[in-house]
Image: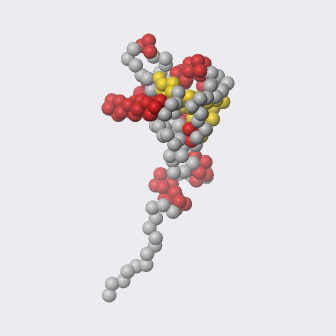
Amino acid sequence: MRNLILVLGDQQDHHSKVFEDFDPVQDAVWMAEVQEEADYVWSHKLRLAYFFATMRHFRKELLDRGFVVHYHALSPDPAADRGKTFSEILRQDILRLTPQKLVLVRPGDHRVLTSLQQTAADLKIFLEVHPDNHFFCSLTEFREYAAGKKKLLQEHFYRYMRRSSKNLLTPKRKPVCSQ
């Protein structure tokens, strides 16, 4: 296998950067329902059910398009449990599938990114991380904005983004005088 494409639950996008160079003959997709992510922040059971259902539907769409998908589903059966974290499950699949490279869109959670980077480093496999183009600005652009500021307020950042992108600005109007 050439590339193992890691698709996280909040990154279900057929137009994702990770699919630009995808070759169904040489590459495969990896997805995992993970207990740690279900428990990390409290969520209503219906939200979790919906989240996992969308992942399973996305997997089916990929399979229908002829992609190879390696999918770990949560199961009440302890024998089917291969781990509670992305790292535990991914480690086993890397050893079983032996891809040349891992490809990923940057996770929104730094904790998840660090965990996946550590797993790749431990197994001496290259991890290619693409920026998430669902955000209005890049991480680099935000770091440049934040550099040197003593206090960061979301409202100020939003104003900066509106000015720099010229979005959501109303043109200045001359006052209307009624006589």
Q: How far across and how far down the image is residue 41, in percent?
A: 41, 32
- Asked whether residue 164 appears in the rendered view, the answer is yes
Residue under the image location 49 percent in, 17 percent down: 82
Residue under the image location 51 percent in, 31 percent down: 66
- Asked whether residue 34 appears in the rendered view, the answer is no
Answer with left or right where residue 178 lies relative to residue 6: left
Q: How far across and how far down the image is residue 109, in percent?
A: 51, 36
- Asked which quadrant contains residue 78, the reply is top left
Residue under the image location 53 percent in, 21 percent down: 88
* Quadrant, the N terminus: top right
Q: Which residue lies most toward the top here?
A: 79
Image height of 105 relative to 96, above or below: below
Q: Nearer the viewer, residue 4 or 178?
A: 4
Q: Nearer the viewer, residue 132 or 69?
A: 69
- Looking at the rendered structure, the number of numbered marks drawn on it comes to 0
Q: Nearer the viewer, residue 96 or 135?
A: 96
Image height of 81 relative to 15, above or below: above
Q: Nearer the viewer, residue 8 or 66?
A: 66
Q: How far across and how far down the image is residue 73, in percent?
A: 43, 23
Residue under the image location 46 percent in, 55 percent down: 155
Which color scheme does this rendered protein use?
secondary structure
* Quadrant, the C terminus: bottom left
- Asked which quadrant contains residue 18, the reply is top right
